[in-house]
Amino acid sequence: MSEDLPKPMRLEDLIGYNLRRASLVDLQGATAALERAGTRVIPMCVLSTVVERPGVTSAEVCRLLGMQRANMVPILAELEAKGLVFREADPLDQRVQKIFPTQDGLEQGMQWLTLLADHETKLLSRFSDRERQDLLRLLSKLWQEAD
Amino acid sequence: MSEDLPKPMRLEDLIGYNLRRASLVDLQGATAALERAGTRVIPMCVLSTVVERPGVTSAEVCRLLGMQRANMVPILAELEAKGLVFREADPLDQRVQKIFPTQDGLEQGMQWLTLLADHETKLLSRFSDRERQDLLRLLSKLWQEAD
DNA sequence: TATTGTTATACTCTATAACTATA
DNA sequence: TATAGTTATAGAGTATAACAATA
């Protein structure tokens, strides 16, 4: 009885359009939440990665976060200047510097993560637990399985 | 028996992190798909809006797409220079210009939308129809209901 | 040859302030 | 006073090429 429309014919039917709008809404709230703590989203992501993987190298962080090495330089310099991470020469490979969180870095990393978790609780207040789980799973599957 | 962990403690547990990674993966593919047609994502979104709402004003497109008025100016100039849209003074309000798609604009708008739909079919090839529907609904709910 | 960390640079997108013409 | 369209400008994020040191 109903005709089949095989392709989306409107902008709002595109997953990508809704992805970008949703990501932008989240980013605004996340930026505001972190601004009060004196940081931004990208340094927060880098610090979290260092906290979760102490001894990681700059190039590894770049691969994990999908960033260019050149753009990591000022971010790490900023975190180091704030006393949140420090670098150590790797005796096994003179090219690389292993990055570790300081005690302050561990505490700030936890606090920044909590700020974002609180922001997300507000953002998703009308979502059921099941909807949050589904959304997280589908988004993760989307970018992790991308070739 | 299991402990309850009320807040995410890792970067990858944040919806926002997965939103941004997923949006970026999609954006790369969408940009590549549109590059072959000689355009970019934002002009495509603007043209689609004009096609779906002929006679819309610049300020209305900005509100619909969440853009600043200042940033719309060069986009509309580009679409106009390509002969895809044209503007008409509104006799009822001398401040506004109503924007309409040309015949070429209608055809290009359809073609650009098809390019993105094809890109999404590839991107979501491992997603079931149900998963695509769920993802679309959850993303739309996230940004449309945001206050 | 390939990789790491780095510098310099350019480009896109986004944000803000200020202007004019009109409502 | 508020809004529409515009200009100029600054900022954040991203991308590429090239370099020296090391593997």
Image: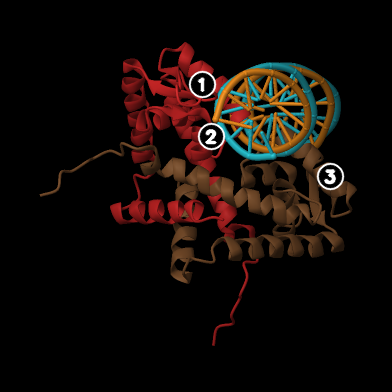
Chain colours: A brown, B red, C orange, D cyan
Residue ID at (43%, 25%): B34
For the N terminus of chain B, the quadrant is bottom right
Figure check: B11 above or below B126: below
Q: In this rendering, is residue D9 above or below A38?
A: above
Pinpoint the chain carrying mark 1: B
Q: Nearer the viewer, residue A13 or C18?
A: C18
What label does residue A78 carry, if any? 3
Same chain for marks 1 and 2? yes
Amino acid marked by disc 2: Cys
SS state under label 3: helix
Residue at position x 50%, y 26% from top?
B93
- As drawn, is B14 to the left or to the right of A38? left
Residue type highlighted by circle 3:
Glu
- The residue positioned 58% from the left and 45% from the top of the image is A24
**Spatial CA span between label 1 and label 2:** 11 Å
- Can residue B14 be seen at all in this image of the molecule? yes
- Residue bearing mark 2: B62
Q: Earlier in the sequence, mark 1 or mark 2?
A: 2
Which quadrant holds residue A68? top right
Total numbered labels: 3
Question: Residues at marks 3 and 2, common chain?
Answer: no
- Chain of the residue where label 3 is placed in the rendered structure: A
The 10 Å Cα crowd at callout 1, few under 14, some 14 to 19, many 20 or more, is many
